[in-house]
Image (cartoon, rainbow, N blue to C red):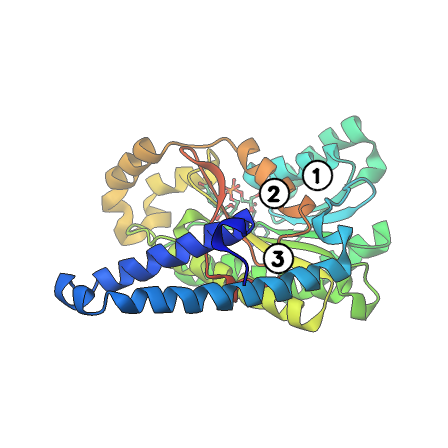
């Protein structure tokens, strides 16, 4: 083992982080037991140090086998993307962001009028062969299957899937689970079907739209919270499966704070909020406290997650106060490509 000071910066960062966690944990036992055990943290710290170095060495040697590919950023020009819930709000902004980067995009939505209207706008700007609108309810298994098939028939391949369609409805909570979680799980399975290298796909990226409500419980939206926690758990697990099974597909999730879209207006509707409607002033106070993004601020995060080939199983957070940053998990839980 080299001298501590000569270790690279990533090593020092993790070393000190692990050390401080250990001290924090021991502080949890109270001062007395900490003072009895004060030599133990140092021994455990050294164990962590050695173990962490071993894991990082393995990871480094693994990454060097894929060489520059692991550190590069993929080009979006010529790629084919499918975006659910692409007719308005965040999905609409994502569609434009991808097309500006040179991708062809299938926008999938239940809202026919809005979808067709947007497709006309995109045709004028990017050319009619660059996008496709498909009417589809993501809760309908066959419709979603057809939408993927039509996209591949039209563009010949598929590289990017953004499972973005989502609703807020605590009253009809089963629908919330069906759209936000079941629809997203199906969309991920279909994306893998077309993009997995074992299936003849070219590999690619799946991005599942969660929310800060997937990280911290929101009192006014217990079922929405459950759906968004579910998205993170599912995404991290299937990202690990992609790593183990060498699918060639990276799968990440993104968690924006409040975004200025129609979904935010549902907070003010009893038919969406049910018994939680009475707490609407409380959630509005949270909006004042945390601030509200425009949909375009989510687009930059989406582009980063698509382009950065290091990221698989990542949980990106976007807040007004801290911008784009990531939820931290122990390195042992982080799937890698
Ligand atoms: N607005 C926010 O504050 C916020 C914050 C974090 C995460 N999100 C998430 O971002 C995603 C997009 O939400 P938004 O804010 O743009 O909302 P939005 O209501 O503006 O857009 C949602 C889109 O999904 C479509 N959709 C709804 N149900 C569908 C279904 N069954 N099949 C196909 N399409 C369907 C709608 O027609 C609409 O075009 C959602 O998953 C939402 O949970 C939103």
Q: Is residue 107 visible?
A: yes
Q: Is residue 34 above or below residue 85?
A: below
Q: Earlier in the sequence, mark 2 or mark 1?
A: 1
Q: Report the residue at 54% width, 50% height from top.
A: 6
Q: Residues within 10 Å of mark 1 (few under 14, many from 20)?
A: many
Residue 127 position, x and y percent, is 83, 32
As drawn, the residue found furthest toward the top would be 125
Which badge, 3 or 1, is on the more N-terminal residue?
A: 1
Tell me the residue that label 3 is attached to: 312
Q: Are marks 2 and 1 in contact (CB under 8 Å)?
A: yes
Would you call the spot at circle 2 few (<14 residues within 10 Å), some (14-19), or many (20 or more)? many
Q: Measured from the top left, where is residue 226 in percent x and y?
A: 40, 60
253 sits left or right of 330 in the view: right
Which residue of the protein is positioned furthest toward the left in this rendering? 32
Residue designated by label 1: 98
Q: Give the secondary structure at mark 3.
A: loop
Which mark, residue 244?
none
- Give the mark toward the camera: 3 or 2: 3
Mark 1 secondary-structure assignment? helix
Cα separation, mark 3 vs mark 2, equals 13 Å
Q: For mark 2, what is the residue?
A: 302
* Depth order, front residue of 163/216: 216
Look at discs 2 and 1 and give the one toward the viewer.
2
Q: Earlier in the sequence, mark 3 or mark 2?
A: 2
Mark 3 Cα shell of 10 Å, populated few (<14), some (14-19), many (≥20): many
- Residue 134 lies, in percent from the top left, at 71, 49
């Amino acid at each position: 083992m080299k001298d501590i000071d000569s270790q690279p910066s990533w090593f020092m960062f993790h070393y000190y982080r692990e050390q401080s966690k250990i001290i924090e944990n021991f502080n949890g036992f109270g001062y007395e037991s900490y003072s009895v055990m004060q030599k133990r943290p140092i021994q455990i710290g050294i164990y962590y140090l050695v173990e962490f170095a071993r894991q990082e060495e393995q990871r480094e040697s693994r990454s060097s086998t894929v060489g520059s590919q692991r550190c590069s950023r993929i080009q979006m020009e010529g790629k084919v993307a499918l975006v659910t819930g692409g007719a308005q709000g965040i999905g609409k902004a994502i569609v434009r962001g991808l097309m500006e980067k040179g991708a062809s995009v299938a926008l999938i939505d239940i809202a026919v009028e809005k979808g067709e209207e947007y497709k006309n706008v995109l045709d004028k700007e990017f050319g009619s062969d660059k996008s496709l609108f498909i009417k589809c309810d993501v809760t309908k298994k066959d419709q979603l299957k057809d939408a993927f098939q039509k996209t591949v028939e039209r563009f010949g391949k598929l590289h990017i899937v953004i499972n973005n369609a989502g609703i807020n409805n605590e009253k009809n909570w089963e629908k919330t689970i069906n759209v936000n979680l079941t629809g997203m799980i199906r969309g991920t399975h279909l994306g893998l079907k077309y993009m997995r290298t074992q299936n003849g796909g070219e590999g690619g990226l799946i991005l599942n739209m969660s929310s800060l409500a997937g990280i911290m419980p929101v009192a006014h939206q217990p079922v929405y919270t459950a759906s968004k926690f579910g998205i993170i758990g599912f995404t991290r697990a299937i990202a690990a499966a992609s790593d183990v099974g060498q699918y060639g597909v990276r799968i990440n999730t993104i968690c924006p704070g409040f975004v200025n879209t129609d979904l935010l207006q549902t907070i003010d509707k009893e038919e969406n909020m049910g018994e939680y409607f009475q707490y609407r002033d409380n959630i509005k106070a949270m909006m004042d406290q945390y601030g509200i993004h425009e949909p375009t601020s989510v687009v930059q995060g989406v582009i980063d997650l698509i382009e950065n080939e290091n990221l698989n199983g990542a949980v990106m957070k976007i807040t007004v106060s801290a911008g784009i940053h990531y939820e931290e998990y122990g390195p042992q839980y982080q799937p890698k490509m």
